[in-house]
Image (cartoon, grey):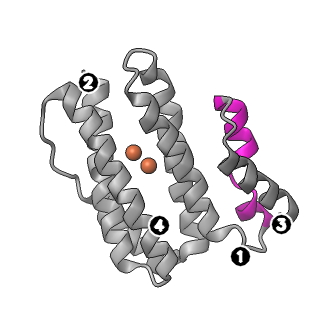
Amino acid sequence: MKTLLKAQQGEVDAVFMYERLAKKVKADKDRAAFTRLAADEARHAEVFRKYTNKDLKPKKTKGIFVPLMYKLIGREKLYPVIAKGEYDAAKKYKHVVKHFPEVESVMNDEIHHVDAVKGLIYHQSTNPAVAGYLSIQGIQRLYHTKTRRTTHHCRRSQTQV
Ligand SMILES: [Fe+2]
Ligand SMILES: [Fe+2]
């Protein structure tokens, strides 16, 4: 139950964070992406709420800190950090799925979130360390997931990195 509550809190915090970030970002496609992600995280929070039967309020630290970092270090440096957070969430959920099968769709969403956030910057980045950060191939190896979408991104990243 503690794991589920922690996961729910993380999702609730992520909704708040992405909503605030969406208001802050300059590019329309970034705003659209973060608005979509906020909606996904809200759905995830609901999956966990059904297990815990508790309503949680967001802890606002990330929601304040991340938009501030957007201003201070810029999107090219910030988005890989956000993508890493999504990757870590997916990895964490891999263990939860064994006991709570409904979490599988949440985990798959987090994998797509890595892709979505990275997709906002890597095609513009000239820095290979940023462009190659958390390769989609690595995620596929980890989860044995081969969707058409990730394969497509994988091909793109190979030609552009
Ligand atoms: Fe989530
Ligand atoms: Fe996510």
Element carrying mark 4: helix
Tell me which numbered mark, 4 or 3, is placed earlier along the sequence.
Answer: 4
Residue at position x 27%, y 33% in the image: 48
Above or below, comparing residue 116 to residue 89 in the picture: below
Tell me if mark 1 has few (under 14), some (14-19) or many (20+) residues whose alpha carbon lies within 10 angstroms of its own: few
The residue type indicated by label 3 comes to Gln
Find disc 3 in the rendering and name its residue: 160
Q: Is residue 141 magenta?
A: yes
**Viewport quadrant of the N terminus:** top left
Q: Is residue 31 magenta?
A: no
Asked if disc 4 is less than 8 Å from ligand 2, the answer is: no
**Rendered residue at 84%/57% (across/down):** 158
Tag 1 near tag 3, CB within 8 Å = no
The residue pinned by badge 1 equals 124
| Magenta residue span | 128-143
Task: Kindly indicate whether the residue at mark 4 contacts the one at mark 2 (C-beta within 8 angstroms).
Answer: no
Label 4 belongs to which residue? 33
User: How much space separates mark 4 and mark 3, taking CA atoms?
Assistant: 22 Å
Q: Residue at x 57, y 51 (%)?
A: 114
The residue wearing badge 2 is: 2
Q: Gap between marks 1 and 3, in whole Å?
A: 9 Å
Query: Does 107 sit left or right of 41 as displayed?
Result: right
| Image height of 64 relative to 154, above or below | below
| Sequence-earlier tag: 3 or 2 | 2
Of circles 2 and 4, the one toward us is 4
Element at label 1: loop
- The answer to whether residue 59 of the structure is visible from this angle is yes
Say whether marks 2 and 1 touch (CB < 8 Å).
Answer: no
Q: Is residue 99 left or right of residue 75?
A: left
Secondary structure of the residue carrying tag 2 is helix
Of pointers 4 and 1, the one earlier in the residue sequence: 4
